[in-house]
Amino acid sequence: MQHAAVHAVLACRAFLAVLFIVSVHGKARRGTAYRRFEEAVERLLPSWPPTRMLGSRRIAALVLVAEAGVPVLVAVPATAPAGLLLGAALLLVFAGMLARAVRAGHDGACHCFGESARPVGRGQVIRNLVLGSAALAAAGIAARGGTAGLEGTLVAVLAGALLAVLVVHAEDIGDLFRSL
């Protein structure tokens, strides 16, 4: 595999690790944040037999466990493709649920990264579609293997982590520029 592809996969792995660490921390840091997340899951879940059978509280717990697993899996080269696939699956399912909520006129927050008053919107759907697609592509590339030098690895990991921080705060950054 060419170095550019290896670096792109490393950046994606770092990106997903930071993204899901922030997500888990935001939901689990306080009991109120987790309860708000559970309430959002209950509102956003489709009323399908499997979701009714499991219940929103169990599904919220499963989501949190799956999100916590992504950083662990992407950190280890041997399990990175599985972590990238798990991250992609989560992001694409979230995109579908959010798209359904937007179409239905749902005006509550998703609490994606913890407590939030921001209502669900198209931007979150697009964000999750793009990120999920990138993770899926990176999983395909990562499965082929490859190595990179130390300098390239450091730059790729730092770039991925920085991009994750920017994505997590993108709506706040947008609000800042709109207020000028």
Image (cartoon, grey):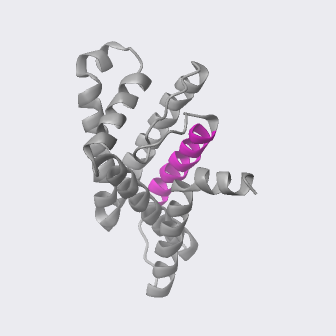
Quarter-of-image position of residue 173? bottom right
Q: Residue at x 52, y 31 (%)?
A: 98
Could you tell me what secondary structure mostly forms the magenta stretch? Answer: helix
Residue 144 visible somewhere in the drawing = no
Q: Residue at x 44, y 86 (%)?
A: 150
Q: State whether residue 105 is above or below residue 161.
A: above
Q: Nearer the viewer, residue 78 or 35?
A: 35
Magenta stretch, residue numbers: 123-141
Quarter-of-image position of residue 112? top left
Q: Nearer the viewer, residue 149 or 113?
A: 113
Which percent across, then down, holds residue 65? 25, 45
Q: Nearer the viewer, residue 161 or 7?
A: 161
- 134 part of magenta stretch: yes
Which percent across, then down, holds residue 33? 33, 43
Residue 37 visible somewhere in the drawing = yes
Q: Residue at x 31, y 20 (%)?
A: 51
Q: State whether residue 128 is above or below residue 19.
A: above
